[in-house]
Amino acid sequence: MASWYVAIILGVIEGLTEFLPVSSTGHLILTGHLLGFTGPKADTFEIVIQLGAILAVVALYWDRFIGLLKSDPEKSFSGKKGLWLLFLTSLPASVVGLATHKYIKAYLFSPFTVACALAVGAILIFIVEGMDKTERSTTLDEITPMQALGVGLFQCLALWPGFSRSAATIMGGMLLGIRRTVAAEYSFIAAVPIMFAATGYDFMKSYALFKTDDLIFLAVGFGVSFISAWVAIKAFIYLLGKLTLRPFAVYRLILVPLIFMFL
């Protein structure tokens, strides 16, 4: 297994980028190439640290997730209706992802394809931020089934490594009339079911690659990812109350030539 510092570096990168519109998958692919940590074990390690980032969302929005277990007359996003919204959002990418899983793994996980996705996503961010939009949903409880399904369709763009699931769903939410900060929060919550399903599917196929001696390495990456994601989510929501997504688009465009320069 790789040195412990690799677990820390990748855990930090996963946690900081998973829920920002900059693509955690893209950053992990690029960092893995730079660190020489690639192959089946590296892929499975990425699954473990993604789980750490997911659990940070569950911890931060614990009240919302508990609220899904029982309907609250004062909160539309609760009980069966809340679960229905999450189902609608998760459905499109789940179906498309299962149908194209082998193709994506075989052809789209490379620095070149990641660079292209980063550039395309950045351009779309500038386009979406420049459009006139009417905010019809200013809280999570005002999100409609059609908006939830629409966000799910946009989430399919994230199947292209480097595009960013967060960028796809937040832009989709904004175009569908959801306030930027609310679209981000819904993006975080909606990530949990589809990411649990995706990571679980991948982990079941490859967990046997690890031995008992690897558990500390996995635990370090998991814990670092959880803490980093917690900090990133809190900071991102704060920044979105003051900024647009444009700074993240600029960062993505700066990253593209660096990828070709160093890889």
Image: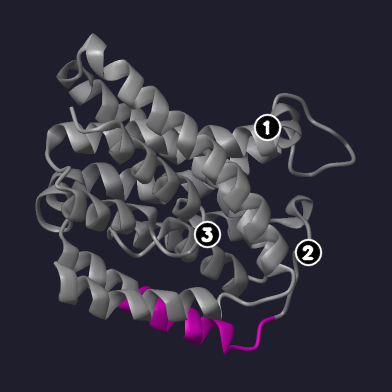
Question: Height in image: 238 above or below 134?
Answer: above
Kindly state the secondary structure of the residue where label 2 is placed.
loop
Which amino acid, by three-letter code, is at mark 2?
A: Thr
Q: Quadrant for residue 134, please give it.
A: bottom right
Mark toward the start of the polypeptide (1 vs 3): 1
Which amino acid, by three-letter code, is at mark 3?
A: Val
Q: Which residue is mark 3?
A: 151
Kindly state the secondary structure of the residue where label 3 is placed.
helix
Tell me where the magenta segment starts and ends, as one range.
119-133
State the separation of the CA atoms marked 1 and 3: 19 Å
Q: Is residue 142 left or right of residue 111?
A: right
Which residue, as the protein is rendered here, is positioned at the far top? 212
Q: Which residue is mark 2?
A: 138
Q: Residue at x 11, y 57 (%)?
A: 107
Tell me residue 235's x, y (percent): 66, 57
Q: Residue at x 67, y 51 (%)?
A: 234
Q: Nearer the viewer, mark 1 or mark 3?
A: 1
Q: Is residue 189 left or right of residue 252?
A: right
Q: Which mark is residue 18?
A: none
Disc 1 crowd rating (10 Å Cα; few below 14, some 14-19, many 20+) is: many
> Do callouts 3 and 2 mark residues in contact (Cβ within 8 Å)?
no
Question: Height in image: 71 above or below 29?
Answer: above
Question: Height in image: 125 above or below 108?
Answer: below
Can residue 6 be found in the magenta stretch?
no
Which amino acid, by three-letter code, is at mark 1?
A: Phe
Mark toward the start of the polypeptide (3 vs 2): 2
Q: Residue at x 58, y 36 (%)?
A: 56
Q: Which residue is mark 1?
A: 65
Residue 117 visible? The answer is yes
Q: How many marks?
A: 3
State the separation of the CA atoms marked 3 and 2: 15 Å
